[in-house]
Image (cartoon, rainbow, N blue to C red):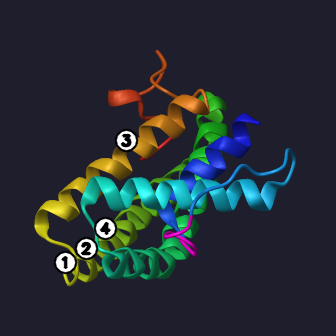
């Protein structure tokens, strides 16, 4: 259940698909995953629209923009996670760690961070075509709140062995 909530929260962060944002939300039958996910998307869209003060047209464009960038950002997240796992394995080997593999992983982490920055830059330019600067700032803050809550729900909040602000060393997110 916790993993499902985390996935739904991350879905709201990245994709924010909204098909029926103007319709009332009704209770879904227990166990009907598709209906529950749709209900979650609708509620998330309504929350975002209210918090950012978006028109229906802006919300539609936000949905399309997120749908365009979400797959790229998700793929980078997968790559980052895989690199962190491999790096952790190498580091657990202590002095017998494969130096070249560690070097390649560190270089790869930097490359992925650069790719993420490039994607976010293009995404922000696109958002600037239909959101005001204040709306964009609020959207970034709202995304950070969702991300923080997702980390709390997944049990990956700040831990003693993690780096600054609860982040794992060598990675953007745990």
117 left or right, relative to 174: left
* Location of residue 4 in the rendering, given as x and y in whole percent from the top left corner: 72, 45
Report helix, strand or loop for mark 4: helix
User: Given this view, does label 3 or label 4 mark the residue nearer the observer?
Assistant: 3
Q: Residue at x 49, y 63 (%)?
A: 14
Relative to 5, residue 74 above or below: below
Badge 2 element: helix
The residue closer to the viewer here, 115 or 10, is 10
Q: How far from the left and from the top, in percent, is residue 167?
A: 42, 34
Asked if residue 13 shows in the view, the reply is: no
- Mark 4 or mark 1: which is in front? 1
The residue singled out by tag 4 in the image is: 117
Question: Does 156 sit left or right of 53 as displayed?
Answer: right
Determine whether 172 is above or below 137 in the image: above
Q: Which residues are magenta?
A: 18-23
Residue 124, numbered circle: 2
Q: Position of residue 154 (x, y in %)?
A: 61, 33
Residue that label 3 marks = 145
* CA neighbours of label 1 inside 10 A, class few (<14), some (14 to 19), many (20+): few
């Amino acid at each position: 259940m916790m993993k499902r909530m985390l996935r739904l929260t991350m879905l709201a962060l990245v994709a924010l698909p909204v098909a029926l944002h103007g319709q009332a939300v009704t209770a879904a039958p227990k166990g009907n995953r598709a209906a529950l996910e749709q209900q979650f998307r609708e509620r998330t869209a309504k929350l975002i629209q209210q918090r950012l003060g978006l028109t229906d047209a802006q919300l539609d464009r936000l949905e399309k923009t997120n749908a365009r960038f979400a797959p790229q950002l998700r793929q980078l997240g997968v790559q980052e996670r895989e690199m962190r796992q491999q790096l952790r394995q190498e580091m657990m080997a202590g002095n017998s760690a494969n130096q070249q593999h560690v070097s390649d992983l560190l270089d790869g982490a930097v490359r992925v961070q650069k790719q993420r920055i490039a994607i976010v830059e293009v995404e922000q330019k696109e958002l600037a075509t239909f959101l005001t600067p204040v709306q964009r700032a609020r959207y970034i803050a709202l995304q950070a709140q969702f991300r923080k809550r997702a980390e709390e729900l997944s049990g990956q909040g700040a831990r003693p062995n993690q780096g600054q602000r609860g982040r794992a060393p060598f990675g953007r997110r745990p």
